[in-house]
Amino acid sequence: MTCQVTVLPSGHTFGVEAHETILEAALRQNIGLPYGCRDGACGACKGKVVAGEVSQDGFQDKALPESERIQGMALFCCAKPQGDISIEVREVTGAGDIQIKTLPCRVEKIEKIHDVAVLKLKLPVSERLQFRAGQYIDILMKDGKKRSFSIANAPHDDAFIELHIRHNPGGSFSDYVFNQMKEREIMRFKGPLGSFFLREDSDKPAIFIASGTGFAPVKGIIEHAIHQGIQRQMVIYWGARTLADLYMAPLAGSWQAAHPHITFIPVLSEALPEDNWQGRVGFVHQAVLEDFADLSGYQVYACGAPVMVEAAHASFTGERGLPEDEFFSDAFLPSKDANAAK
Ligand code: FES
């Protein structure tokens, strides 16, 4: 049986299946309830049941004391509705509503693909990171410095935090990742940060333009959009020097193969003879200019080297009529990453 939940004050409604908690059902349907541990320990998902009944178990008393239960408070990560209900809770509508945390994490896996290390980070058992697909985290170094990396996975797939780190010889952090970092190592990070995420209140077709590891947040956004069943037209341009630099091209190709509304266009600027490249060549923003005479009805999401992001912004808004407020970007600026390790 499906129970209906009405969220106040927004009036949003969603259905909860018998096997689901209220939080699980809300996240599945893209309703932004707040959460932290998803395990009844932190209290971040707490709200009030104003009409109807819930059953809840598996939570810790300190997260929901008896005195609060009596007042109708519930932890939605542990609560199941017993019929249709109304709840009162602060909804997460933008990145600004998500709590920024400083957390320890363990390096669970290091996979090297060409000159990119794909790190999988695991949080402590009682923690989950709530984030919007496309945001980034700051890795906090022992020397007090920080390095910013985009989250490459989508929020629904949050067993690990995935980062893509390009080897930049001479860059202290990326040298460290490539030469010394060991699995099971403990690090600390702060996040989620940034406003590079899909504007889901729009149904305009979206163009994604990435250079190098700027692919990482695009991957998170596309995986999120696929999971949510978002059917907007999405065109992904990924620019790199050589074929090997397109370190996850088969994955992007598989999105195109499985979803008619997604197109993947790889663009190489310095293809090697052995690449035997038959595809698009040149600078990645130029490929967009060649393909689109008018961008006035589009959104553009650009991520990667500042020079690419700046060129895309200038030419798309200046020459192709892209509205200024429909251009979203995350440039790998030195202020976010002193050694350009991102
Ligand atoms: S998310 Fe931590 S108690 Fe529900």
Image: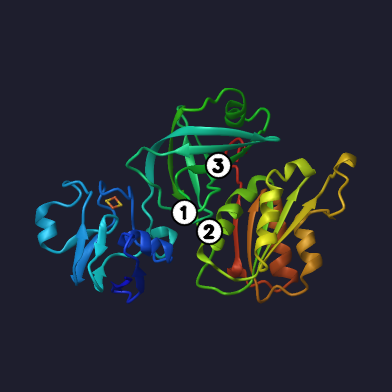
Q: For mark 1, give the secondary structure.
A: loop
Label 1 close to label 2 by CB (< 8 Å): yes
Which of the labelled discs sits on residue 224, or is there none?
2
Q: Secondary structure at mark 3?
A: strand
Q: Amino acid at mark 3?
A: Leu
Pick the front one: 137 or 305:
137
Indicate which label's residue lies in the foreground, 1 or 3: 1
Could you tell me how far apart the alpha carbons at marks 1 and 3 are, in whole angstroms?
A: 14 Å
Viewer-nearest of discs 3 and 2: 2
**Of label 3 and label 2, which has the lower sequence position?**
3
Residue beneath label 1, please?
A: 155
Q: Is residue 208 visible from the viewing direction of this image?
A: no
Quarter of the image holding residue 258? bottom right
Residue at (74%, 71%) from the top-left corner?
320
On-image quarter of the N terminus: bottom left
Furthest-right residue in this view: 273
Type of amino acid under label 2: His
Q: Which residue lies under the disc numbered 3?
A: 163
Q: Is mark 2 within 8 Å of ligand 1?
A: no
- Which mark sits nearer the N-terminus, 1 or 2? 1
Q: Residue 286's image quarter?
A: bottom right
The image shows residue 280 at horizontal and vertical percentages of 83, 56
- Residue 221: which numbered mark, if any? none
Tell me the element at label 2: helix
Residue at horizontal 88%, vertical 39%?
274
What residue sits 25% from the left and 68% below the top? Answer: 88
